[in-house]
Amino acid sequence: MDKIDYAAIEEHVRGILKALGDDPDREGLRETPARVAKMYGEVFEGMNYTNREIAEMFDKSFETGYTENDIVIVRDIEVFSYCEHHLALMYDMKVTVAYIPKGRVLGLSKIARIADMAAKRLQLQERIGSDIAEIMQLASGSDDVAVFIEASHSCMTARGIKKSSAQTATVTLRGRFESDASLQNRLFLQVNTK
């Protein structure tokens, strides 16, 4: 169910254009409020769903012969998001998800879809990692999940301090990845080997 109010977005975008001193009725801007509303529907799609609902959408799994110490890692999932503080783009974002299957493995595309949907919200990078970890736990049935994210933030690269090469890295560990140092070492070795 789409919870996004497209008419309200259009109305407010018109107001922003006026507040910026421009004429929302001029040729180049006439359709901008509708375009922005449509774009917001796409880029904020994840706001329509809870983490549990996303997990249920993407929980397709398959039986496996994996043992309790085998790790599945999907690297460099490209996503983007918008910072909730400035509505600024978080870009060049790469997500790596690792988990230890519990008798079944998720379809690999489902992991990428989970990362994408978690990012399609007004977010903080740290929360994206936590959301992906929670959704992965729900979808896979495994408590053992790790999420690594690297991204550039336009609220830091294009405004304010304007440090264009600054990258932010976050690590979210759950289950045994959080408590087992030898498992952490194995994971970090795999993630950092390309």
Image (cartoon, grey):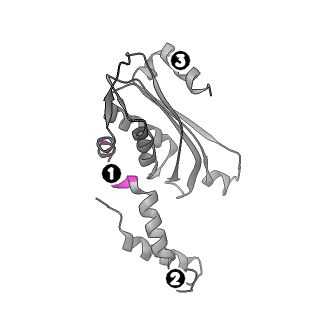
Residue 30: which disc? 2
Cα–Cα span, label 3 and label 1: 34 Å
Mark 2 residue type? Arg
Mark 3 residue type? Arg
- Up-down relation of residue 41 to residue 55 (above or below): below
First in residue order: circle 2 vs circle 1: 2
Cα–Cα span, label 2 and label 1: 31 Å
Quick check: can you spot residue 115?
yes
Residue 62: which disc? none
SS state under label 3: helix
Residue 186: which disc? 3
Q: Residues within 10 Å of mark 3 (few under 14, many from 20)?
A: few
Q: Quadrant of the C terminus?
A: top right
First in residue order: circle 3 vs circle 1: 1
Quick check: can you spot residue 131?
no
Image coordinates for residue 20, horizontal then vertical, percent: 58, 76
Q: Residues within 10 Å of mark 1 (few under 14, many from 20)?
A: some
Q: Residues within 10 Å of mark 2 (few under 14, many from 20)?
A: few
How many numbered dots are placed on residues in this image? 3
Image coordinates for residue 148, horizontal then vertical, percent: 53, 34
Mark 1 residue type? Tyr
Point 37% across, 24% down: residue: 101
Residue designated by label 1:
49
- Up-down relation of residue 46 to residue 98 (above or below): below
SS state under label 1: loop
Q: Quadrant of the N terminus?
A: bottom left
Q: Which residues are magenta?
A: 46-52
Point 32% across, 41% down: residue: 55
Tag 3 and tag 1, C-beta contact below 8 Å: no
